[in-house]
Each structure stands twice: as structure tokens, then as C-alpha cells.
Image: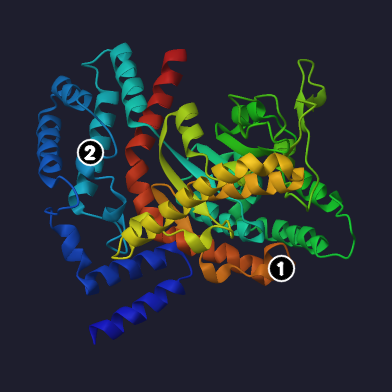
Amino acid sequence: MKKIKLIQVEKSMDEARNYEEWKELAIEHDELSGMQEWKEKDKSHLYDFEEIKYRLDTLRKLRKKKDDEGLLFILKEGIHGNMGGMGKSTLYSRAKFGTKDLINEYIDEISAALNQISKTRKISKADKVEFFQIASQCFGRSALILSGGGQLGNFHIGVLKALCEADLIPNVIAGASAGSMFAALVGTKTNRELTNFFANKEYHSDLKKEAILYHNLLGTETKISAKDRIEIIEQQIPNLTFQEAFERTGRKINISIAPYESHQKSRLLNAISSPNVLIRSAVFASTAIPGIYPPVTLQAKNRAGKIQPYLPTRKWIDGSMSNDVPTKRLARLYGVNHFIVSLTNPLVLPFVSDPGDGGLLQPVKKFGTVLIKEVTQFNYSIAKKFFRFMPSSFNFTANTINTIIQQNYTGDINIIADLSLIRPDKILGTLSKEELLELVRKGERKTWRKLEAIRLTTQIGRTLDEILKKHKVELVT
């Protein structure tokens, strides 16, 4: 009887109309499955519950006594998202909603302690700011990465909608190919504009426009015109540089592009490495699918604000070819150590699974992935010696295939599109408005499953960001 009830609840979760409805059903599922009892028990082999409990008790005592100096001393010992292994992804995939209550309480206590230090008059403002800067640097940053995926990229809209409504979109966002368009869209809108964009369902009309773009790809013309693509991107993305977008929204957007020439390296465009490059031109380049659209020369503003070619002798193509999920570069640029990945790349979806889901087959899948990469790299390194005798197009194709296989496509929290969404005739084909909206709904529901994990694992970082922002304003005034 319980099994039948669980199946009924799972079906209702799949049909939930909003996150609050889904959340209630998820909690009910945990009650029925026994996972609520698991959450209430501190003990587990998955993390060091004794260390977490000890630190939690210590923080509570110091806060209760209002011993702010002692509290600061304890906090200086270390604030990070994986204290005692509490950031382990498997801890957030056991239950349908949330994780161990002890972890929830510890995260809440850390946040409360940080806010208490921020408000106390027992510690100088200079000491507080120095502490929060160091704590923020040590804790790290979270980033959202939107992969390529052709028409499947519309799945990202559902992901962004769910994150926006929960106020959980990270400040660092990266996108490649189709993902670059949505990263640019988010990175050029203020919080209010983005909220209105989803609340008023403005994306419905944008999806309809995008259907026109992919309709042209199935035309009978021998050479594909980029006219519609240019029109859509210009309508959706303001003509801002990366620096101007950052100053407007405070978001650090990053767009991957791949080199058209064999001797060039892939690049991650952003306000740090390429502040004057126009975001539109970066999206044009990142969505330039080889064989479909011609390679692109980037555009930038010069000192006088006039638009001119950027690296005029170089051309660029689809960013997912070389850097679909740029975790290493984001880590180096922004100190990111926590990655939320929305994965829609149809070339890799059949071979990728969420490491956080665990299961008996997970080690086998991981071994299989490693084996494929090693065998491919070994064969490529041998065959490369003979590439000089082959046509340049063969060289380019072999390099691209090897690069795609060698990339890593998952992060700490993964929102992975279902394999059932892959329809070869629709990847670059015409979708009806209903089909487009279904992709959005799928992305939204997939994100609901991860929202509580995202909220918990980013809460301390968001608290530190809010406190630093507040103190910087006070210091200026």
C-alpha cells in the first residue's frame, strides 16, 4: 500500500504546477519513504556529524552569551561549504527535499553568527571588513554554467526561471553555444527586469522568435543565411560590452568561444579578460555552429566608444566545441569552487550521469567514462602524427571530436536534461510554441529537485556577499 502511495505522490510531483506544490509533495514523499527519519538522525557515514555537532554547540553557546570576540575567533578557524564533508553531493540526493537537519541547523547558525559579527560594536569596522573579506575568499564562490544544446538550450530558461523565483541565481554565470544566449540575457538584465521577464512570461514571444531561426536551418538553401539569427540576438541582447553589463547588473557573465584556426586556443570572454568586447558579438561567435554558420570576428568598443573589430585577424566558432563547462577558468578568475551545471548538450547527454545520484552503477559509469577518455586520447596522440598528410578539414574534425570527449561536463550540483528530450530532427529543427514551452517546464521541474540543495550550499556565501556589500556602502558614506 505504501509503495502505491509513493508512486502516486511521485506522479503528482511530476505534474506539480509550481514549486510550493512540488515542495509539499516532496516532503510527503520523504515521510512515506522513511527519509524524513533519516534527515532527523545526525549519525551517518556520509559526513563527520560529530565535528559539525561540536561546532554547532560551540557557536550557539557563544551567540547566547553574546561573546562576539569569542565568536569571531571560532569563525576565523574556518568557514567553508564542505566542513566535515557536509557539502558532499550524495547528502543532498538521498531525500526528495533537503538533507540532514543537523546540516541545516549548522548552516543557519553560521549565517546568524556572521550577521551578529556584522552588527556588533565590540569589534572595529576595519577588523570586521578584513575578516569578512578573508572569510569570503576562503569560502569561495558559486557559479551557474549553461551548456550548449541547440533547441534543447531552451531547457535553460526553465532552470533560470526557477532560480530567479527563488532568488538563487549566482552572480557568476557562464554559457556556451545556446547557453551563451541565455547567460547574456540574464547578465544584461537587472534583478527587477529579470523578475518581470519571467513573471510576465515575456520569454514566450522570444521562444516563438527562436523557432523561426531553427526553421531556416532546415531550408533548402545551400548556404544558410545568418539574417534571422542576427535579428533574434539583437532583439534579445542589448548592445553592451562585458564591462558595461557588469556595471549595470553586478553579474559576472562569461561566454566560451572556440578558435576557428588550429593554432589558436579557446577563450572565455568576460569583464576581466575582455571588458570592451560586445556581448552580442560574443554570442554570435559562441553560437556559430561549424557547417551551419560562418566563423565570427569579435567586435569591441575602442577608447572613444566606437565599435571596431577585436583581434581582426582571428575568427571564432561554437564555444561548446572546446569549453562547454569551463570550471577551471572560472575557478582561476573568480575563486569559484562550487559549480551548478545545467546540461543540455545532446552529444554528451547519453554518456553523462549525475555523480550526486549515487547508486550501485555509478562507479561502473565513472570507470566507463574515464576509460573512453583515456582510449580516445591514446589513439588521438598516435594518429596525430599522420594528420599532416590529411586535409585540413579532417584535422579540424578530429581535433574537435577529441576535445569534446576530453571535456568534463558535470559540477557539484547538476541539472541534466532527460535523454527523452533528444530528438535528432528537432535539435536544429522547427519547434512549435508548445514544444518550446514543454522544454521550459522540464527545466523548471528538474531545477525544483535541486533548489533546496542550491539554497543550502550557497547560503553562507550569499550571507557573506550581502554583509560585504553592506559594509562597503557604509565605508563609502
Q: Quadrant of residue 221?
A: bottom right
Q: Is residue 238 left or right of residue 90?
A: right
- Residue displayed at 66% across by 43% down: 386
Q: What residue does disc 1 label?
A: 431
**Residue sitting nearer the eye, 465 or 159:** 159
Res 83 label? 2
- For mark 1, does the 10 Å Cα neighbourhood hold few (<14), some (14 to 19), or many (20 or more) residues? many
* Residue 282 on image: x %, y %: 70, 37
User: Which is nearer the eye, 292 or 255?
Assistant: 292
Disc 2: CA contacts within 10 A as few (<14), some (14-19) or many (>=20): some
Q: Position of residue 416 (x, y in %)?
A: 48, 59
**Quarter the N terminus occupies:** bottom left
| Numbered disc 2: secondary structure | helix
Whole-percent x and y of residue 192?
58, 43
Q: On screen, 443 above or below 58? A: below
Residue 396 found in image quarter? top right
Position of residue 182 in the picture relative to residue 133 (left or right): right
Q: Amino acid at mark 2?
A: Met
Q: CA distance from mark 2 to mark 1?
A: 46 Å
The type of residue carrying mark 1 is: Leu
Where residue 213 sits in the image (x, y, percent)? Answer: 78, 58
Residue ID at (72%, 48%): 394
Question: Looking at the image, can residue 238 be seen?
Answer: no
Instruction: Find residue 203 and report its image quarter.
Output: bottom right
* Depicted 34 relative to depicted 272: above or below: below
The residue located at (55%, 65%) in the rendering is: 441
Q: Residue furthest bottom?
A: 1
Check disc 1 and report its element: helix, strand or loop: loop
Q: Is residue 95 visible?
A: yes
